[in-house]
Amino acid sequence: MEVLVALAVLAVSMAALIQTAANNASNAGHLRDKVFALWVAENRLAELRVADTWPDLGKRSGDFEMANYRWYWTQNVVKTVTSDLREVTVEVRKKPDSELPVSSLVTYLGKP
């Protein structure tokens, strides 16, 4: 009887360990995607900062390859209450038709 109880406790413990390992693997993949998407958004904002022109108002989209993945970014430029600033939001997705972005960054650009 004691052996059966010990085996049951061991089985429950092993199931919990396997579940934890699976969650860690899933989280690692998600965090990797978040980091790469953030880098893509930062690269897009850096391109806008070094450009000699002010970004046009409205939406613009494109793609970028990083870490053997194709990432799809959408940039939205809107006016602010200050005429010398524009708000720029860059959202990055793994698929062009994905509803939710993997990462999103917002910054403000001054008039060059």
Image: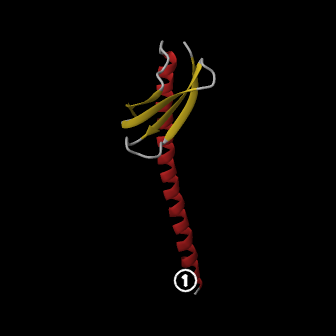
Q: Position of residue 46 (x, y in %)?
A: 50, 22
**Which residue is tagged 1?**
4
Q: Position of residue 25 (x, y in %)?
A: 48, 52
Residue sitting farthest toward the right: 82
Residue at screen point 46% across, 37% down: 92
| Location of the N terminus (image quadrant) | bottom right
Q: Residues within 10 Å of mark 1 (few under 14, many from 20)?
A: few
Q: Is residue 107 left or right of residue 75?
A: right
Residue at screen point 38% across, 43% down: 95
Q: Position of residue 82 (x, y in %)?
A: 63, 21
Residue at screen point 48% across, 36% down: 91
Instruction: Report the amino acid beneath label 1.
Output: Leu
Residue sitting farthest toward the bottom: 1
On screen, residue 62 above or below 102: above
On screen, residue 76 above or below 15: above
Q: Position of residue 62 (x, y in %)?
A: 38, 31
| Location of the C terminus (image quadrant) | top right
On screen, residue 55 above or below 40: above
Residue 109, quarter of picture = top right
Residue at screen point 46% across, 29% down: 58
